């Protein structure tokens, strides 16, 4: 049986747990040094995943920005950029977004009812795979493993983080906590409500706590609850 990828959830959030505010412009929570750390983590991964909602809202290119890191990947026989992956149940994607036009290969996971819609929208911009009548994260990770993805970085949004944490599928969590307070009820949060493994008293193992300028990086091992 092919092994599933090692899954790293990565997010920057405010002290009160928000990923963004409600303004049209993206709230920059990290600082330059932390953005560089994220770039380093991206370069170490075989694939990067974001949800379709995050793609529509932020319109990210989702690249490894460092030329040196890209050259190192190429020297190791890997593509300069990790595989870019998105997930959509509705099939509502826009072929003009930056995600499709930068980097190397792209992959879309969807459900049976949306496959034709996604293929018609994207054409040859991405490979499209259905995981069945409903989104199944286990099947999705199995398919990534079959495609040679050993390490997967998940960059949001909150719904995806919640689903992966709730199903105990995240191996590591990277949280960059910014010294900001958002406090807006309609703003997106890092995690939502879920029946998390072990309940509210299960403590995750802390792997690292490090100050990066005015941001604090916290790394946890979610599967190592006690």
Image (cartoon, rainbow, N blue to C red):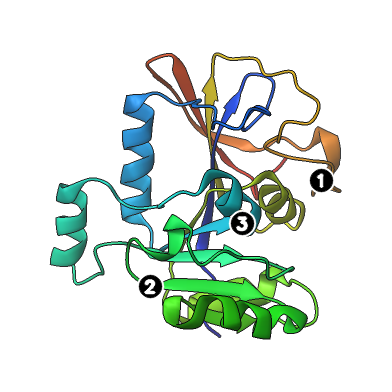
Q: Visible in this render: residue 145?
A: yes
Element type at marker 2? loop
Q: Residues within 10 Å of mark 3 (few under 14, many from 20)?
A: many
For the residue pair 216 and 107, the one nearer the viewer reads as 107
Marked residue nearer the N-terminal end (1 or 2): 2
For the residue pair 76 and 112, the one nearer the viewer reads as 112
Which mark is nearer the camera, 1 or 3?
A: 3
Element type at marker 3? strand
Tell whether label 3 touches label 1 (CB within 8 Å). Answer: no
Residue 105 - label: 2
* CA separation in Å, label 3 and label 2: 16 Å
- Tell whether 210 sits left or right of 128: left
The residue indicated by pointer 1 is: 198
The residue indicated by pointer 3 is: 51
Return the x and y of residue 54 as percentages of the image width and height: 60, 49
Quadrant for the C terminus, please. Answer: top right
For the residue pair 73 and 107, the one nearer the viewer reads as 107
């Amino acid at each position: 049986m092919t092994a599933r990828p090692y899954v790293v959830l990565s997010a920057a959030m405010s002290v009160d747990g928000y990923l963004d505010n409600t303004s049209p412009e993206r709230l920059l929570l990290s600082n330059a040094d932390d953005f560089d750390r994220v770039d380093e983590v991206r370069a170490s991964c075989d694939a990067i995943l974001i949800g379709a909602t995050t793609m529509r809202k932020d319109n990210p290119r989702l690249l490894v920005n460092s030329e040196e890191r890209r050259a190192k990947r190429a020297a190791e026989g890997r593509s300069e950029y990790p595989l870019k992956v998105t997930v959509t149940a509705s099939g509502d994607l826009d072929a003009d977004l930056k995600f499709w036009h930068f980097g190397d290969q792209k992959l879309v996971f969807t459900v049976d009812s949306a496959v034709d819609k996604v293929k018609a929208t994207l054409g040859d911009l991405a490979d499209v795979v259905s995981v069945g009548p409903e989104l199944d994260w286990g099947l999705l990770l199995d398919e990534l493993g079959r495609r040679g993805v050993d390490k997967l970085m998940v960059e949001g949004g909150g719904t995806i983080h919640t689903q992966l944490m709730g199903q105990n599928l995240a191996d590591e969590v990277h949280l960059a906590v910014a010294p900001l307070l958002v406090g807006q009820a309609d703003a997106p949060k890092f995690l939502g409500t879920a029946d998390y493994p072990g309940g509210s008293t299960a403590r995750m193992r802390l792997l690292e706590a490090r100050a990066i300028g005015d941001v604090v990086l916290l790394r946890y091992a979610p599967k190592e609850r006690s």
